[in-house]
Amino acid sequence: MSVIQEYLRYNRQTILPEIGDEGQEKLKNAKVLVIGAGGLGCPILQYIATAGVGTIGIVDFDTIEIHNLHRQILYTENEIGKSKVVVAKSVLEKLNPLISVESFEEKLSSENAARLIQGFDIVVDGSDNFTTRYLVNDTCVTLGKSLIYGSILGFEGQLAVFNHQGSKNLRDLFPEPPNPKDVPSCSLNGVLGTLPGMIGTMMAHETLKLIIGLPGLKNELVLFKTLDWSFVKLKF
């Protein structure tokens, strides 16, 4: 595509004085890895792709199931049974042919985490379990990578930025993961489909701000309760 087409595509954000052509160039040169292509991952991927993040990686080993469709908006009923990362990559490339999308159809583990993460500048964790969240956090700390964190349950969500320019990480907030038996899950307790859309979009927004160099969360945890629209920011 020509420079004119790039200008027309991104004009509504580059006219913001806080972004401009310089900020758009930062987005173009950024490399962001998204862990999970599910409820949080879908809006994260959609928005960072259309905003012009130049290189996006997707890690997920799962296939599309019918119960995913009420909240995982990159997929349709025609794609049930197909690989999430394969379908997500195809959709993102259609949404924005200017970007590069890399798919990793594998389960994140202690054996492959460093290999998958080391080639990216920023990691966005859209996983749905504490084992993966702590593995992602610890690997980012070891490799010096910034991490966008989010989680959802029921009608509530959380958002934080870890390990960015000397800021604290997940273990500074919660030193050890909880016992899996004590942790409720969306599969058992449910989630309204719009909630991951909201929290995932907030995670994407914070990712773009971080890339551009705009003020973001630092040693703060956002708690967002959508039943009464209460919004609390805790320092740690």
Image (cartoon, grey):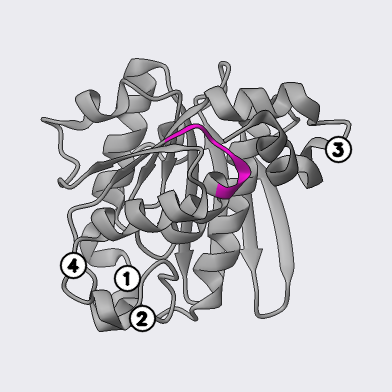
Nearer to us: label 2 or label 4: 4
Q: What amino acid does circle 1 point to? A: Ser
3 or 1: mark nearer the eye? 3
The residue tagged 4 is 82
| SS of the residue under disc 2 | helix
Answer yes or no: is residue 40 visible.
yes
Q: Quadrant of residue 4?
A: top right
Sequence order check, earlier mark of 1 and 4: 4
Q: Earlier in the sequence, mark 3 or mark 2?
A: 3
Is 128 included in the stretch rendered in magenta? Answer: no
Q: In the rendering, at what x and y percent does residue 21 appear?
A: 76, 25
Q: Disc 1 marks which residue?
A: 185
Q: Which residue is mark 2?
A: 189
Closer to us: mark 1 or mark 4? 4
Estimate how packed mark 1 is, as few (under 14), some (14 to 19) or many (20 or more) residues with alpha carbons within 10 Å. Answer: some
Q: Which residues are magenta?
A: 50-55
**CA gap, disc 4 to disc 3?**
39 Å
Residue type at mark 4: give it.
Lys
How packed mark 2 is, by other alpha carbons closer than 10 Å (few <14, some 14-19, many 20 or more), is few
Q: CA distance from mark 3 to mark 1?
A: 42 Å
- Residue, disc 3: 15
Q: Report x, y in % for residue 141.
A: 38, 22
In this view, the residue in front, 21 or 135, is 21
Instruction: Indicate which disc, 2 or 4, sits on the residue closer to the N terminus.
Output: 4
